[in-house]
Image: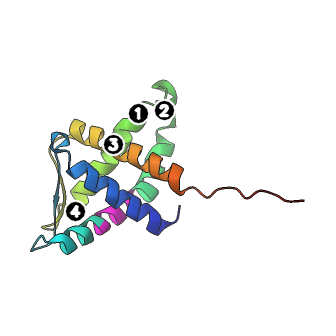
Amino acid sequence: MGFFVRVLVNAFAIWIVTLLPALGVVLVPFAPGEWFQVALTLLVVGAIFAIVNSVIGTIVKVLAIPLYILTLGLISFVINGFLLWLTAWITGFWNWGLRVDGFWLTVLAALVIGIINWIAGLILRPRPRERRD
């Protein structure tokens, strides 16, 4: 997926997660909080999350290869939760962005975001063309 599509899918997934109050993830939009500011905030947070996943996520996942082997891949839930928590921490420097309640709730929210990203990847994946000889 291209970067823009990844940002849109992340923004949609974060919006779905913020609609589930049990996960403890809250979106604080830009000043007035109307629909345009909420959408713009979601797009910016989605872009930050995509950049964090691309840069820091790659480094952390490479360094954690022994933990992936040791835990049979279950460490990926904790790493994805850490990356979402890191995104909330980065946006916490401003008066807008993500706010999370606790780390383990963030891990559950990252699991939901991962499932939504997986479904979107299945839908948006380019289909192979049939060869006609």
Q: Nearer the viewer, mark 1 or mark 3?
A: 3
Q: Is mark 1 in CB contact (under 8 Å) with mark 2? A: yes
CA gap between label 4 and label 2 equals 29 Å
CA gap between label 1 and label 2 equals 6 Å
The answer to if 119 sits in the magenta stretch is no
First of labels 1, 2 by sequence position: 2
Q: Is residue 113 left or right of residue 37?
A: right
Q: Nearer the viewer, mark 3 or mark 2?
A: 3
- Residue where numbered disc 4 is placed: 91
- Residue where numbered disc 2 is placed: 68
Q: Residues within 10 Å of mark 3 (few under 14, many from 20)?
A: some
Q: Give the answer, above or below, for where 35 lies relative to 126.
A: below
Percent of width and height locating residue 113:
35, 47
- Residue where numbered disc 3 is placed: 112
Asked which secondary structure carries label 3, the reply is helix
Q: Give the answer, above or below, for where 56 lies relative to 78.
A: below
CA gap between label 3 and label 2 equals 20 Å
CA gap between label 1 and label 4 equals 25 Å
Q: Nearer the viewer, residue 18 or 61?
A: 18
Q: Amino acid at mark 1?
A: Ile
CA gap between label 4 and label 3 equals 20 Å
Q: Amino acid at mark 3?
A: Val
